[in-house]
């Protein structure tokens, strides 16, 4: 069966949300919402196929959150049909509220998979933002509800929803601020969490300030948000669950500084809103804003200097100085991490240059270094962003693909790396390449050492077969 395109998942929800938004109380809208939501939940669980270990656990928590939300909707509909209009509190609230910690737990596990041992900064920034959001909810939503209704069961249950949003916001902030790739599936998740936050706040605001307007009109936003969560799970790119090795993700993003500034100003701003005179508010807030901006600017400059020094040291320790590619130690670390997340997924291509030694001997080490650096650049340009390219030493290179699809698509491109001759100071240098490939799924208990050894052995078999087919060494160097 052909796999459903990722973009089709939110598209299906967008079609269903039209009647939900326009006429939520009609039977058509209710059927469209329920059927679409059930389809999304089924798709979320179907997307767990092939996952295992901690990846499966994170996926299951997120899919479980969507499941309990769907069950809450079904229970609410059943109570409404069987027992008449449902009051402000029902058993469905238990299911709806329980979805928030499930989804948050899945997001935090996902963040830990993306950045193992590197969540400290993201966790602190996320908590700072969450305290600010919690204070806003307290002042603007929870406290007014208690003042108007007293501490009653409906009022207490109502407060669980903004609390759940704060928990969800914290998990989303950790996912956003933690190191990791920001492409496709991550963007789906971030947009989904923003829409969930907006939808929940909008429904609560309508209930408090415009009780005559049905909050069900905003259910379409939540349906779109849920579809984006499912799209993120359905996307088979490894960005959600695989550590990123790009140094850029360790840098302090400007948006992060803005968020921290907003968090720093939230509590004082909320406190000053209680002042009766608007002039007094402005006079006190302006110096506070200026001082906050100066402190954040100074903080950013210090962090940037630390980042540059740390990045230089980290790059020197993990990369080959000549080619800029990953070195042997870092290759083993990344390959072991990939095997822990998916023991059958990684594919190793072991590359060895044919005829490099004659070039190096005839023209000297400077030309040999040029050849190695240029081959390394071409290798990096012909693989996917998620793939790892390493130089083991001498004229040996390794390319690691994280999944079967990636491995199949780049093998032909790797063979073409040496097909285009290299020109150095008027000399046309022709260097061949032999490639051996090893699949983790073909080994009983794959490790980084066993995978590299298998690929190395296959490379030598390819090299021997090529020499036998030619019958004699080819011309390795031609004058320009």
Image (tube, rainbow, N blue to C red):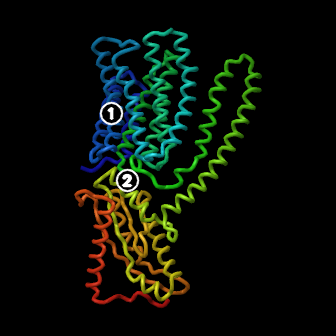
The answer to whether residue 364 is above or below residue 392 is: below
Residue that numbered label 2 is attached to: 337
Find residue 39 and report its image quarter: top left
Residue at horizontal 32%, vertical 40%? Answer: 57
Residue that numbered label 1 is attached to: 64
**Is 76 on the left or on the right of 329, as rendered?**
left
Q: Position of residue 287 (x, y in %)?
A: 75, 32
Residue closer to the observer: 119 or 401: 119
Q: Position of residue 4 (x, y in %)?
A: 31, 47
First in residue order: circle 2 vs circle 1: 1
Q: Residues within 10 Å of mark 2 (few under 14, many from 20)?
A: some
Residue at horizontal 52%, vertical 60%? Answer: 315
Residue closer to the observer: 319 or 409: 319
Work out how far the residue at label 2 is from the one at label 1, CA to CA, in angstroms. 26 Å
Residue at horizontal 47%, vertical 37%? Answer: 172
Find residue 10 and report its image quarter: top left
């Amino acid at each position: 069966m052909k796999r459903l395109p990722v973009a089709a998942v939110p598209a299906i929800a967008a079609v269903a949300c039209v009647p939900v938004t326009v006429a939520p109380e009609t039977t058509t809208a209710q059927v469209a919402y329920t059927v679409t939501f059930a389809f999304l939940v089924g798709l979320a669980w179907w997307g767990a196929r092939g996952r295992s270990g901690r990846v499966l656990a994170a996926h299951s928590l997120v899919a479980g959150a969507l499941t309990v939300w769907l069950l809450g909707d079904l229970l609410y509909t059943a109570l409404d049909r069987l027992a008449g209009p449902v009051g402000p509190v029902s058993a469905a609230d238990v299911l709806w509220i329980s979805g928030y910690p499930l989804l948050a737990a899945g997001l935090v596990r996902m963040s830990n998979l993306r950045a193992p041992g590197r969540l400290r900064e993201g966790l602190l920034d996320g908590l700072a933002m969450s305290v600010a959001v919690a204070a806003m909810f307290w002042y603007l939503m929870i406290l007014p509800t208690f003042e108007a209704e007293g501490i009653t069961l409906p009022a207490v249950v109502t407060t669980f929803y903004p609390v759940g949003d704060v928990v969800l916001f914290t998990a989303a902030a950790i996912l956003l601020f933690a190191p990791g790739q920001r492409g496709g599936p991550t963007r789906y998740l971030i947009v989904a969490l923003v829409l969930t936050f907006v939808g929940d706040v909008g429904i609560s605001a309508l209930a408090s300030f415009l009780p005559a307007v049905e909050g069900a009109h905003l259910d379409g936003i939540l349906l779109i948000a849920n579809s984006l969560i499912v799209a993120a799970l359905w996307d088979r790119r490894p960005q959600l669950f695989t550590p990123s090795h790009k140094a850029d993700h360790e840098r302090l993003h400007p948006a992060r500084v803005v968020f921290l500034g907003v968090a720093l100003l939230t509590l004082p701003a909320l406190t000053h809103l209680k002042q009766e005179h608007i002039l007094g508010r402005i006079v006190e807030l302006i110096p506070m804003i200026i001082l906050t901006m100066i402190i954040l600017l100074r903080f950013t400059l210090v962090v940037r200097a630390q980042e540059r020094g740390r990045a230089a040291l980290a790059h020197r320790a993990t990369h080959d100085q000549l080619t800029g590619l990953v070195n042997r130690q870092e290759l083993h670390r990344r390959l072991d991490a990939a095997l822990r997340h998916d023991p059958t997924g990684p594919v190793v291509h072991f590359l060895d240059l044919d005829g490099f030694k004659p070039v190096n001997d005839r023209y000297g080490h400077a030309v040999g270094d040029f050849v190695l650096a240029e081959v390394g650049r071409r290798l990096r340009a012909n693989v996917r962003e998620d793939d790892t390219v390493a130089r083991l030493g001498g004229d040996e290179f390794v390319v690691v693909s994280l999944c079967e699809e990636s491995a199949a698509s780049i093998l032909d491109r790797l063979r073409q790396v040496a097909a285009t001759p290299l020109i150095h100071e008027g000399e046309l240098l022709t260097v061949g390449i032999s490639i051996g490939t090893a699949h983790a799924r073909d080994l009983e208990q794959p490790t980084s050492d066993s995978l590299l050894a298998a690929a190395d052995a296959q490379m030598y078999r390819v090299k021997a077969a090529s020499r036998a087919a030619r019958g004699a060494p080819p011309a390795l160097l031609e004058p320009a």
